[in-house]
Image (cartoon, grey):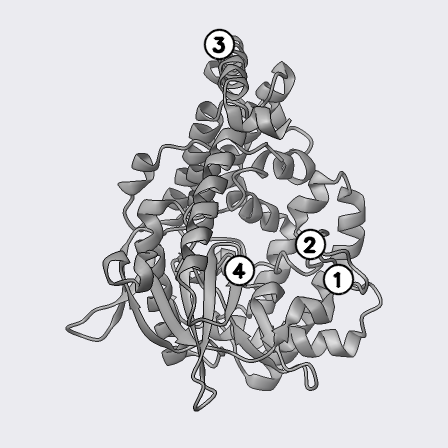
Amino acid sequence: MAPYDNIADRNAQDERIEFARRLINNRSDLITLLKGSFNIGLIHENRGSGEKIVLRFPCTGTVHAPWREEKVRNEVAVLEYLREKTSIPVPRVLCWGPAEESPYQLGPFIIMDFMEGVDLSEIMETPGRDKDEVPVLNPNIDNEKLDYLFEQIAVYLLELSRLEFPRIGAISKDVASGEWTVADRPLTWNMNELVTLGDHPAEELDGMEPYERVSDSFLSKASHFKTHLERQRNVAQDDEKEAWDRFVARRVFEKLIPVYNVSDGVHSAGEGGRFRLFCDDMRPTNMLVDPETLRITAVLDWEFTNAMPAHLAADVPSWLLLKRPNVWLDEDKTDEFVRLFKPRAEQFIRAVERVETREQLRTGSTPLSAQVRDSWESGRFWLNFASRCCFDVDEVVWEFLQGEGRGEAMLDESERAQKARFVKHKMEQFQQYLKEKESDPRFAKAE
């Protein structure tokens, strides 16, 4: 994994601390604090009726501040759409608004129903985990229990796979017609990471429009990856070889887009020209279940959900082991990951097949289960995964996509000619970064 910019990360931490301080100072009538990756929620209980609601704010420092209102607006639209079009249990939005209408002036907000249940990942994880460790799927979990959970999630994915959009971007409801449309750029988790931790200039992303074609969407991602590598000063530390290897990996990613038939909505499963709702963060840690029946009672946190290329929604879920693939790569456990992930991928595909047969939920001429299997077996899963991981794209390319005949051999003459200039530039950048960090009293105190 490429390192975060530690200075940017410390700036974000300071913003989060200040936001939390203001929140705590204004929560006298609120009873419980809920903390997530991108949001802080407060539960309020009506003492007479016992009814609970959640007041939720996007965290300053975790979400790029100018994008917080856009993030809230997009998530509210997705929640309304899901309640209207699917059986997925999502909270009802009671009220939402921009910063100027915010309780306690804490930023844009959503007030929604409180959903009952326990964290699904707690049901699935290996017992006895230290709280500081990333949860991992219990290798001895009962397969019937896991099949039941997989089948419920398969129903949701199949429902989403039948709902199509004409473009790639954020969805919204046209006030006049009541029809759902795509009118704005896709605001993604990856974009937020690039800006908050990777020194990517936000203004270059602010001018984005919805995409008409899959190829344009993926080539745009490749461009963002290259800009990130160019701009983040410590991305390769003081290692010339690593700097050049990252340069090569990001060019290889771009050149593999047509190799995996990711072009203009057409891919080898035959499902082209359609875009589907895709959530980067639809995983067990954002799902609640009834601990007695194992029925999923809520699917939460739909931020950064957009109409996206159909093949992203036709991948094996990357969370099947709970701990994501990039974490296994960071720990140098690639072989162990593959050994454990393959049988769970097959188990999930079989669950989709059973639901397709039982519920008669099919998508077009090619069943979703066949699309998922094709993505996994062809290796397109890894290109799709890399496209969503700005800090891990290099490792994914190195481990799963840079096979025989790829790598530096794929670069053209003009790209190879950039090596000396690029490496020199990255080494100079890192020295400038070190000087700035060494002069920052916040890091001196930490040492």
Q: Are the residues at dot 4 and dot 1 in contact (C-beta closer than 8 Å)?
A: no
Which is more foreground, mark 1 or mark 3? 1
Q: CA distance from mark 2 to mark 3?
A: 38 Å
Q: Residue at x 53, y 70 (%)?
A: 157
User: Which mark sits nearer the N-terminus, 4 or 3?
Assistant: 4
Q: Amino acid type of disc 2?
A: Lys
Q: Which residue is mark 3?
A: 421
User: Which mark sits nearer the N-terminus, 4 or 1?
Assistant: 4
Which is more foreground, mark 4 or mark 1? 4
| Residue 199 place in picture, x, y as percent | 43, 31
Tell me the quadrant of the picture where the C terminus can be found.
top right
The residue lying toward the viewer, choosing from 52 and 382, is 52
User: Which mark sits nearer the N-terminus, 1 or 3?
Assistant: 1
Q: Does the rendering let one see residue 25?
A: yes
| Residue 394 place in picture, x, y as percent | 60, 33
Residue 155, by quadrant, is bottom right
Q: Which residue is mark 1?
A: 137
| Residue 184 place in picture, x, y as percent | 27, 54
Q: Which residue is mark 2?
A: 323
